[in-house]
Image (cartoon, grey):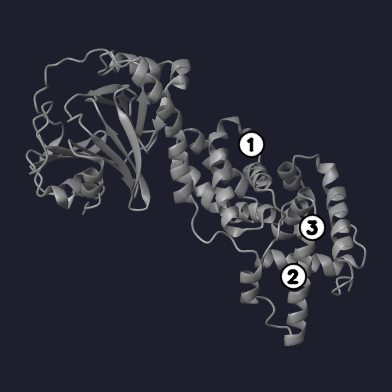
Amino acid sequence: MEGRPAEDAVLVERAQHGDTEAYGDLVRRYQALATRTAYVITGLSAEAEDAAQDGFTKAYFALGRFRPGAPFRPWLLRIVANEAKNRRKAAGRRVTVDLSIAEDRLSGDTALSPEEAALASERRTFVLGALGKLREEDRLVIAYRYFMQLSEAEMADALGCARGTVKSRLSRALARLREIAGGEVGLGD
Amino acid sequence: MTERPEDGGLERTLSEIGARLDGPKRDLWPAVRMRIAERRARPWWSRLALDRTTLAPVAATLAIILVAAFLLTPDLAARAAQVLRLPGVQIYQVPQTPTASSTAPALTFAGQRVTTAVEASRIAGFTVRTPAALGDPSAIYVETAPVRATIVYESVKGIPISPQAGVSAIVVEFKGSLETQIMAKATGPGTTLDAVPLGGAVAYYLAGQPHQFFFFDPAGNMQPETLRLAGNTLLWQDGGVTYRLEAQVSLQEAVRIASTLR
């Protein structure tokens, strides 16, 4: 984590001077995060990849406006999220975040009894359903915190809000999520 | 963050979901690189359509002076329509190019003449490859400042001999980077540009009137490159090396030749 900002900065600077392959390194470094971000908004993995690609492309042409020394990751995620939002608006549909493929892997559930694993899976499915009913901004703040483990400062940058409001936004989003998902599958334990 | 006791279950479930979210199913960089290249090409295309009608009568040949002005003056450079930036390669479109000398330069190539690609590779420091479709090269020249290999095919069956240089085809290969070498190519309104897929990457095909090349050496001096075919040109990049095929062939044929690089 400590080494990343400097290294990102070096790659960004090289990319700003026309080294396209340096930008390729940044794309490979952040493509998983970018795709997840887009996925949380679009809900479809194919569309998320497409949105992430467009986000990376737009970010490349916006590099000239990138503030030297600023963290690249949240700046990029903000662009990707905007791209995904525009696509979802254009498509005019609700989000259904579908993890059926990921659920097949059952990774992490191996230590659980079959009943516990089934319950955990059911909880995830239910929470995902509830997430899909949240507002985009609430979904994003939750995703940045729990899916991508961004720091508060990074979340503030990625969401375009003051650092001081990140905590309150996150707890409001969690409260709304709990309201929708609340209690039905044992989330209160 | 202060949590109420019941937050634990929800947060744990959210973290579990996060651990299961897939990343992209494939490397996005090739597609992003393609989109970047296509977006660079876009304004050039649209302007080209206008130019064709408005500037058709203009005798458009090459413009070393004009392009040099574009490159050397920051404001103008910013306005120059840069359509392509492979490592070491930049293409600028200029609205009008002054008449070039009609005198064809003598067919000479700079650098050390070698007989095999293996020898060329040893001098160049990277693997010099030749397209099998063109047969055996007539000559290979290797320059070391900057490092560049030029493979000459004097006569290839089915490919006309260029009136500009008196050979059928030329393949130029170099490890380019913008910091160490910039080669620029001016394209006039009569030139068309196509982006085509080639081996999972993108290649660029320039066709139309003859072009003239020049590049900046590592010291920043502009070096005119007047000894090339200046015919239809396919530019592509593979493994950090930029390739340029010049031959009077169609786009499809150029791509076919490029795909036989060995």
Whether residue B241 appears in this view of the structure is: no
Chain of the residue on which disc 1 is drawn? A
Q: Could you tell me residue B144's position as x and y percent?
A: 22, 36
Q: Is mark 2 on a helix, strand or loop?
A: helix
Q: Tell me if residue A146 comes above or below residue B161 in the rendering.
A: below
Taking the spot 75% from the left edge, 58% from the top edge, the residue there is A132
The residue identified by callout 2 is: A125
- Please name the amino acid that badge 1 sits on: Gly
Whether residue B211 appears in this view of the structure is: yes
- Please name the amino acid that badge 3 sits on: Lys
* Badge 1 or badge 3: first in the primary sequence: 1
The residue identified by callout 3 is: A133
Q: Nearer the viewer, mark 1 or mark 2?
A: 2
In screen coordinates, is A40 left or right of B187?
right
Return the residue nearer the eye: A39 or B181.
Answer: A39
In screen coordinates, is A4 left or right of B122?
right
Q: Characterize the local packing of mark 3: few (<14), some (14-19) or many (20 or more) Cα atoms within 10 angstroms.
A: some
Whole-angstrom CA distance, mark 1 to mark 2, is 40 Å
Return the residue nearer the eye: B256 or A2.
Answer: B256
In screen coordinates, is B186 left or right of B253?
right
Q: Nearer the viewer, mark 1 or mark 3?
A: 3
* Badge 1 or badge 2: first in the primary sequence: 1
Q: Tell me if residue B6 comes above or below residue A175 in the rendering.
A: below
Q: Label for residue A69?
A: 1
In screen coordinates, is B116 left or right of B193?
left
